[in-house]
Image (tube, helix red, strand yellow):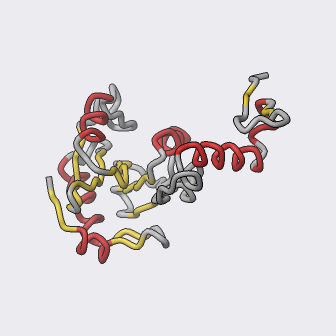
Amino acid sequence: MDSFHLEDFLEQINQLNYMIDNKIKNFIKKHAQDEENNEVCGFIVEKNNTFSFLRCKNTSKYPEINFEISPFDYLNIKKNSDKIHYIYHSHPNCNNCEFSEKDKNCSEILSLTMILFCTETSEFKIFNPNNINYNFVGRYYEYGKYDCFSLILDFFLIIKSEGFCDKVNCFFGAGNLVPTFQLS
């Protein structure tokens, strides 16, 4: 496990432009070189203001063309980290440096930005999931204004405004503060 401090990490990565620096790239490249014929995978996590690269074992039946991370490994990493920032994996022996639909779905389901490294072209790609709503991240708490109830209500108002309710018949009853859903 490699690690570095928060100050270093902030210099290393520009999250607004979704750029990754050479330290992250070199770690992922090294991991891919160590297992050159298989897809490699892992996480970049934060714990106590220190960022670490955590390699995971690829548990796929077909590691040459697919990657899978054990749910137990994922839960252990999630439990022992303050935050998971990225999931990464490689595509070995492939000239196509594009995310598969499976890769994109994984990123969306976990709400994690995914980094892809293609060993043949030494190219990196980044996929940012669409389902992360940064309006709720880092929101401060104030009773009656920004409390748990207002967070949930604001969430439902946003999904209603984004047309989600059209898909599931969302009703805000007259006088009801809490939305109810009826799946069609």
Q: Residue at x 75, y 49 (%)?
A: 162
As drawn, is 141 to the left or to the right of 56?
right
As drawn, is 110 to the left or to the right of 43?
right
Quarter-wise, where is residue 73 in the image? top left
Quarter-wise, where is residue 136 in the image? bottom right
The residue sitting at the front extreme is: 144
The residue sitting at the right extreme is: 174
Q: Residue at x 27, y 38 (%)?
A: 79
Q: Which quadrant is the C terminus positioned in?
A: top right
* Number of callouts: 0
The residue sitting at the bottom extreme is: 11
- Between 49 and 123, the residue placed more toward the observer is 49
Q: Residue at x 36, y 55 (%)?
A: 85
Instruction: Residue 182: give x, y in percent of width and height.
Output: 76, 24
Instruction: Residue 159: give x, y in percent of width and height.
Output: 70, 45
Q: Is residue 2 above or below residue 158?
A: below
Q: Residue at x 30, y 73 (%)?
A: 12
- Between 133 and 26, the residue placed more toward the observer is 133
Instruction: Residue 121: give x, y in percent of width and height.
Output: 39, 62
- Between 93 and 78, the residue placed more toward the observer is 78
As drawn, is 131 to the left or to the right of 35?
right
Instruction: Residue 2: give x, y in percent of width and height.
Output: 15, 58
The residue sitting at the left extreme is: 1
- Between 155 and 149, the residue placed more toward the observer is 149
